[in-house]
Amino acid sequence: MSLSEATKARFAREVAKYPKEQAQSAVMACLSIVQQEQGWVSAEAEAEIAAYLGMAPIAVREVTTFYNMYNQQPTGKYKLNVCTNLPCQLRNGQNALEHLCKALGVEDGGTTADGLFTVAKCECLGACADAPVMLVNDRQMLSYMSNDKLDDLVATIKAAEGKGA
Ligand code: FES
């Protein structure tokens, strides 16, 4: 893979937000752009971002691996992250993760055979009072995720995808 001209143009708009000698400040934005376009961030994409921003590839890798919003492998169409940090743990966060894994027949971090769902635990989403909290496709936060609400979510997505029970 090499970066398309359209992707480079998006990178350039991000780099332009910073002083000339600080292009690497745009690294997170560039990683997000690649993930939006390809669904995940490959080692090859990291190397290309590093070259574009004048950074060491390992420095880009450190960012990709530090933040769990970056996918280091392809995911299902719906990435479901359940927070299991302490405040959520105290209000059934682990139970919510396990319930979702069981409902979909996957392990934590796994993807369903049909490629529809990936389930993984995640770090604090900053809404601890709403525990258990989860995030859908890195964008939509859902609160108070009881087992019933988790079941409803899965059923709603399956129905929308024509895979209803
Ligand atoms: S610990 Fe789960 S949102 Fe903060």
Image: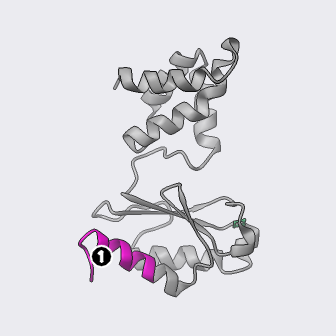
Mark 1 = which residue?
A: 159
Q: Quadrant of residue 121?
A: bottom right
Residue situated in front as seen by the camera: 10 or 103: 10
Residue displayed at 39% across by 48% down: 74
Q: Is residue 41 visible?
A: no
Q: Which residues are magenta?
A: 152-165
* Amino acid found under the numbered disc labelled 1: Ala
- Is 108 inside the magenta-drawn segment? no
Q: Can residue 18 be seen from the camera position used here?
A: yes
Residue 159: give x, y in percent of width and height. 30, 76
Outermost residue to the left: 162
Residue sitting farthest toward the top: 21
Mark count: 1
Q: Residue furthest bottom?
A: 148
Q: Quadrant of ligand 1?
A: bottom right
Q: Is residue 164 magenta?
A: yes
Q: Element at badge 1?
A: helix
Q: Residues within 10 Å of mark 1 (few under 14, many from 20)?
A: few
Position of residue 80 in the picture relative to residue 82 (left or right): left
